Amino acid sequence: MAWLSNRFVRLWLLVLLALGASAWLLGCAATGAPTQAWAQTTPNGIGLFRICRRHPHVGPNARYWYDVGDGTPRTTFLSLDELLESREAKAVYIHDPNAPSESRKLLGIAFQHLPCDKPPPPPPEKVAAKEKGAEKKDETKEAERPKPQPKPLPRPIARPPEPERWEASYR
């Protein structure tokens, strides 16, 4: 144990011990999956995430994509149920324009500052149905609303009886 008497060796042992302790503490503090509502874990261990923007390396018509653990997004022709049952995927990402903007951080550091996709406008059928519904509501409100009572006529002014002038002029 003469090598422990060297100051240089003791310094490096102390540095290695500190690095090992910090790595162990960081490993224990790491969480397995986020607990937000847009992030879920399936029973077979696959992470299911709803993201408000498509990954730039995924096609514009892809509704979902997956990752096998290497950080490369992949699309598939499998249905979502089949993809969730497979053992190949470690994480499945679903494009949902209504997801919160904080979900963009799952795209990676290079793409997390891209804006979310705008939610699509409602189909014209729903807009027309809403307008018809609004008209019906207005009609029902008018039918339900009681008609205002007419204003009462003003009361006649009560005047004292006039002296009988005409009668006096005929006398």
Image (tube, grey):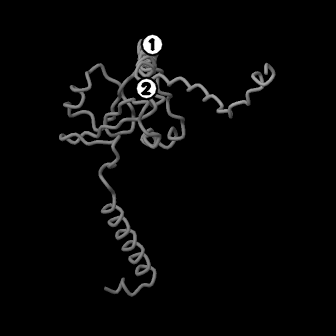
Rendering coords of residue 18 (x, y %): 39, 73
User: Where is residue 56 shown, x and y percent of the image?
Assistant: 48, 29
In the image, which disc is placed on residue 58?
2
What residue is shown with label 1?
128
Q: Nearer the viewer, residue 91 or 22?
A: 91
Q: Nearer the viewer, mark 1 or mark 2?
A: 1
Task: Examine the image and state in which quarter residue 167 appears.
Answer: top right
Q: Is 101 displayed left or right of 93 in the figure?
A: right
- Residues 121 and 96: in front is 121
Residue visible at 35% across and 25% down?
75
Please state if 31 lies on the left or on the right of 102 as rendered: left
> On the picture, is 46 further left or further right than 25?
left
Q: What residue lies at 31% left-to-right and 49% top-to-bottom?
A: 33
Give the distance between the C-alpha atoms of the residues marked 1 and 2, in whole angstroms. 34 Å
Q: Quadrant of the C terminus?
A: top right
Which three-letter amino acid code belongs to the residue tagged 2? Answer: Val
Depth check, front residue: 6 or 168 = 168
**What residue appears at the point 32 percent right and 66 percent down from the top-left corner?**
24
| Numbered disc 1: secondary structure | helix
The image shows residue 40 at horizontal and vertical percentages of 29, 42
The amino acid at mark 1 is Ala
Q: Do the residues bearing badges 1 and 2 touch, measured as CB atoms within 8 Å?
A: no
